[in-house]
Image (cartoon, rainbow, N blue to C red):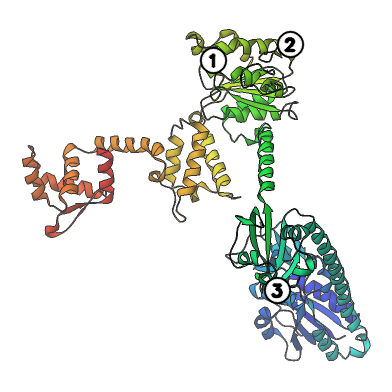
Amino acid sequence: MKSLAIVSKGYETTNNISKQIKDIVKNEIKVNTYYIDDNIKDEYNEDFVIITNYLIKDLVLPKISKNSKYTIANRVINYRYLGELISLTPGSEVLLVNDHKVTCENTIKNLKQLGIDHIYYHPYYPGIEKYKKLQLAVTPGESYLAPECVKKIIDIGTREVDITTIVEVLLHFDLLNTVGKDLTSRFVSSIIDLSKQFNYEANHFLKLKNILQTIVDNSSDAIMYYSPSGEIIEVNNAFLNFMNISKERVITKKVKDVLPKLYKYTNIQVNKEIVYLNGKNVVINRTSIKRRKKIIGFMITIEDTNEIQEIEHKIRRNKRKKQEKPLYNFKDIISKSYSMKKTKELSKKISNSNSTVLITGESGTGKELLAQAIHNASNRRQKQFIPVNFAALPSSLIESELFGYTDGAFTGAKRGGKEGLFEKAHEGTIFLDEIGDAPLEFQARLLRVLQERQVRRVGATELIPLDVRVIAATNKNLEKLIEEGKFREDLFFRLNVLPINIPPLRERLEDIQLLLKHYLKKFTDSEFVNLEHFFENETIKYLMKYQWSGNVRELVNVMEYLINIKDENKLIKIIDLPDYVKKTFENKSRDIFKYKYSDHTIWMLKTLHQKGNIGRRKISKLSKKEGFEITESNARKLLKQMESEGLIEINKGVKGSSITQKGIKILNGLTG
């Protein structure tokens, strides 16, 4: 029996093309398959050899027997698998994944030749250094090569051998009349299926266009779409009403001819500008419409400023409501230290209790964050979380804000009265932050509310029952305030039912690097971050030893500062830290220098800075004038010591020695 060899780079390609050939030639010839990723055969002595890829031609040709014929196959996209590609939104970006740069380029070329050019292809192949990190990939049977960033893969199958190569094989084996009679129908049927898919997508697009037209017509904004040459293509009803014109008068007409008042805005870049048009203040915007990076038209939208103001008011009102809903959960508390682990475990245990919680800790440790996490883990999570900050409330307003008031309770009271924050928190949680700042005269009434779970509005006689969880927090020592007569002892005991203390950041060193990494990731919006790619090692060590008096809040501020000032290709040094952070380092450096070097060395450094380039002889003479003597021999030793530290440069000849930038920096630290 005559034989045919199929030689490809990898198993997948060889196997798929073998199935294609066998399906056509049936059992008329024997088909052998080889792939060079496994090994290269010493000799291919089959009657005919198909090389599936130009890239392996030079490896395979020397191994083909002189008695064998060969061809380098032309390959085409498998039409059967293109449906999903056709359905992609125009302008979508995809990675085209294949095993080599050349095969990537060929596949992209094939797809575009088929008319699938409504999406942007970015080649990806093993060894490529720079590529766009996309989540969607297209591949001809090479899905295992896709990078980690890819979340979805459209596999269009291995490229098949095209009809010209098949005919060449059949002619060689004299099988064209035997098995080739239905060859054309095999290829055409796939194309017909593809045409059906195109037809479906075209009908779908037409329906979508009608839907979009309906949406545009129902928009309250006036919309006009026009071509780059200034011809009006489409307008909506709001536009016609605003410009007081009929559709027949504007469609296919030039803007400058039918809408002269609007014409000037078609020639300039307009971005949300307030203009006076047709007797109204409106916001006008011009947007370029692009297809495959080419401008195909422009859209002008006109918005009534009165409607925008009303929307802004609604947004503010909704924002205020949303602020009453807690944002944080226990997973948002970034830590791995033992002390914080115990704090979180205790907080989770008491979450579903109705007992009052007192959270203590220094400023910036995250007391409100923990309070929100407790609420969100409780059975009250669907109800309100109402925060109250006593440090920010004027003492004259505390009672009316917390307990509410009746109609006419005092001058300026809102008509109909107002519910207090305790009432708002009914069935939810009220967070009494900075409770140590609560005025002493108010504390008695607060104690009564906590004991009786009832509140009386200012100016009212009846009591309102409450079902509310109370979480209080303070950065002050309440026991000390009790001793000073500034805080009621009975209120302290009422609050301190379930005490939780958040340790300061300086006492949980394990959390510092974790927090630095977390906020670096957050502020750079990066998925993968490495502190060593952002900080010098010395800077990390310094931040680990820094006291962090402002705790996590201070760390967050420092990271946000550094993200904004960092040079792209430079690591953050200690000197780059905010002044208040590196002050400790500078003071320490100054002390070390004073301890390390003698007064004579410091005097010489100052003298070099003031006098410029001078030698040891001049230094010796100047020292005598200052009332002490440094011999030339001693001057030489001290200069050598400073040179080894990089503080000065010793120049040859009469040029003498000069201070370096490092020396100036140290000197400024000593005198600063």
x, y (%) of residue 506?
48, 30
Q: Give the Cα distance between marks 3 and 1.
A: 74 Å
Find residue 108 and name its label: 3
Labelled pair 2, 1 in contact (Cβ < 8 Å): no
Find residue 635 and name its label: none
Please name whichever residue, 164 or 233, is drawn nearer the observer in this view of the structure: 233
x, y (%) of residue 438?
55, 17
Along the horizontal axis of the image, is 84 left or right of 365? right
> In the image, is residue 128 above or below residue 169?
above
Residue at the farthest front position: 279
| Mark 1 lies on residue | 439
Amino acid type shown at disc 1:
Pro
- Per the image, label 3 sits on a secondary structure element best described as helix
Along the horizontal axis of the image, is 21 left or right of 622? right
Labelled pair 2, 3 in contact (Cβ < 8 Å): no
Please name whichever residue, 135 or 201, is drawn nearer the observer in this view of the structure: 201
Kindly tell me whether residue 380 is visible in this rendering. Answer: yes
x, y (%) of residue 580?
40, 36
Labelled pair 3, 1 in contact (Cβ < 8 Å): no
Along the horizontal axis of the image, is 659 left or right of 294? left
| Mark 2 lies on residue | 462
Residue at 46% x, 37% y is 544
Q: Earlier in the sequence, mark 2 or mark 3?
A: 3
Residue at 69% x, 32% y is 325
